[in-house]
Each structure stands twice: as structure tokens, then as C-alpha cells.
Image (spheres, rainbow, N blue to C red):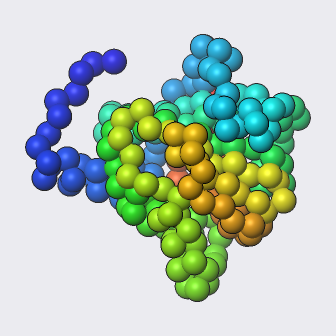
Amino acid sequence: MKAIHTPGHATAFVLASLFCLLAMTHPAHAAPPLASAPSVAAPAELRQALPEARLVGTGALRFFGLRVYEARLWAGPGFEPLRYDQQAMALELVYDRRLEGGAIAERSIAEMRRVGPFSEEQSRQWLALMRQAFPDVAAQDRLLGLSDGQGGVRFFHNGQPTAQIRDAQYARLFFGIWLAEQTSAPALRNALLGLAH
């Protein structure tokens, strides 16, 4: 990977905001599943909670050619994409750059609205949850969302638990950001599901 010039603090803040606010509003350019994907080790927190999980697919979200993060979908044998919200699985994001946790939470709410409707009260509750779940991230930081397939969702930052919720509607809408047919990043969805050519 080529070295990227590190901008000044003010510029970095603007770029972080742009990445968060705009990255998923443009079609994602996702590479096909990596040839080395099967050798990627499952995170420790996932091995404990879902030992049978295997890597389904992986892809990078890019914004104007720059990688924002690499996404990895982990699930048990026989995973059915159209029933993603009813199966135990995990979505892992490995970031390539600094982003503010609050901006990630707000962008997540906006993307969840693409998947399905929800009330303003739900929006407030879920935003508060995700502000707790998503701290500021730097390059190589990992965020992992783990779904038990029955509405239970747990979040981890670099392997440490940050928040949890039991809400089937939230689970469907949140993971739908990447896995629902209504996603704003269809190329990344295909890569995660192993459908990219």
C-alpha cells in the first residue's frame, strides 16, 4: 500500500467528516473477495461467542479511490443472505484512517433509514447506543458487531465490549446497512456475500 501524506489537524478533521458523511452515499468500489481471505483469523471475541463462524466474504469501502475500511462478514455454515437478521453472524470493520465515533453513529442512523422506517424516539435511543458503541477510531482499529440471530447485538472495539442491545428491528436495520438489498453500497454487499466477480 502506498504511503498517504498525513494532513494537518484541521484538514484531518474535515476529511474524517467527509469520509463518514459521504462514503456510503456513493457507490462503494469493492474488490472481489481476497485470495488470502480464508487465512484471515477470526477475532478472539468472535471465537468465544460463535466458534463455528467462518469468513463468508470481505471487501473494502473506498471513497474517491482511498480506502476507508475493510469489512469482513463472519457466519456459521449455511448462512442465508436474505435471512441475515435471523442468523448468528458478525460484521468486522478494520479502519484505514481516523474517524470520529459520533460521526460514525450519525451516519449509521442515516444509512439504517435506507433499509426501513423507524420512529424519532427509536432514532434517539439507537443514536445514544451507537455513540457508546463506537469510539473514535484510528488506522487499524477494529469495530465488530455480533448478532445472535434473535435480536441480540453486541459491539466490540479492538476486542473490548462497548455496548449491547436486544432489539430485532435494530439488528435488521443496522446489519442491513451492509447486507440488505437496499444498501447504498451494493458492490461491497456482493463482496461480503462472496458474490463479487
Q: Residue at x 35, y 55 (%)?
A: 100
The quarter of the picture where residue 139 lies is: top left
Q: Residue at x 55, y 85 (%)?
A: 120
> 36 left or right of 18?
right
Q: Residue at x 56, y 68 (%)?
A: 129
**The N terminus sits in image quarter:** top left
> In terms of depth relative to the viewer, which is nearer, 182 or 147?
147
Image coords of residue 169 (percent x, y): 73, 69
> In terms of depth relative to the viewer, which is nearer, 132 or 66?
132
- Above or below — where is 25 with respect to 62? below
**The C terminus sits in image quarter:** top right
The mark total stands at 0
- Above or below — where is 150 with respect to 71? below
- Above or below — where is 192 with respect to 101? above
The quarter of the picture where residue 162 lies is: bottom right
Image coords of residue 113 (percent x, y): 57, 69
Q: Residue at x 53, y 58 (%)?
A: 133
> In terms of depth relative to the viewer, which is nearer, 113 or 103?
103
Of all residues, the one furthest to the right in this rendering is: 78
On the question of residue 136 being in view, the answer is yes
